[in-house]
Image (cartoon, grey):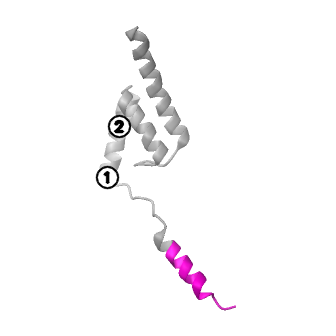
């Protein structure tokens, strides 16, 4: 069976056009480590940012469970601030 030239061309084009996962640089790892350290200490902005990064896969592996975990922590912190302002 001979290979179909159109199918080969399509597969080659698909392989070229497919996005490759971004390589994480040392600067990226350092930035994520700093954001995570702040988030773990209760920084609301860092918690929200980390949740967004896990949701989009920016600088970390995409992980919906981790995203929700960090968004929930940020929401709980914000709720405490709102309740204390009353």
Task: Classify 7 as above or below 86.
Answer: below
Q: Are marks 1 and 2 in contact (CB under 8 Å)?
A: no
Q: Is residue 44 left or right of residue 12?
A: left
Q: Does the segment drawn in magenta span residue 9?
A: yes
CA distance for labels 1 and 2: 14 Å
Q: Nearer the viewer, mark 1 or mark 2?
A: 2
Left/right placement of residue 11 relative to residue 1 reads left
Q: Tell me which corner region of the image, top left, top right, bottom left or bottom right, holds residue 81.
A: top left
Residue, x 63% and y 88% (percent of image)? 3
Instruction: Pick whichever of labels 1 and 2 is earlier in the sequence.
Output: 1
Find residue 6 and report its horizontal and vertical position in percent: 58, 84
Residue holding disc 2: 35
Using a 10 Å C-alpha cutoff, classify the residue at mark 1 as few (fewer than 14 neighbours), some (14 to 19) or many (20 or more). few
Q: What residue do we see at 33% from left, 49% from top?
A: 28
Q: Depth check: 27 or 86 in front? A: 86
- Helix, strand or loop status at disc 2: helix
Task: Check the picture and name the quadrant holding the N terminus.
Answer: bottom right
Residue name at image x 43 percent, y 16 percent: 80
Q: Residue furthest top?
A: 86
Residue 73 vs 60, above or below: the answer is above
Q: Residue at x 45, y 18 (%)?
A: 79
The mark found on residue 57 in the picture is: none
Q: Secondary structure at mark 1?
A: helix
Magenta span of residues: 1-14
Residue 55 location (% of width, % of height): 48, 43
Mark 1, residue position = 26
């Amino acid at each position: 069976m001979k290979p179909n030239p159109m199918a080969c061309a399509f597969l080659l084009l698909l392989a070229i056009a497919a996005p490759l996962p971004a390589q994480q640089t040392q600067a990226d790892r350092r930035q994520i480590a700093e954001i995570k350290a702040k988030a773990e200490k209760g920084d609301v902005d860092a918690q929200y940012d980390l949740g967004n990064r896990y949701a989009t896969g920016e600088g970390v592996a995409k992980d919906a469970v981790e995203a929700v975990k960090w968004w929930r922590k940020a929401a709980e912190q914000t709720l405490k601030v709102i309740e204390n302002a009353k």
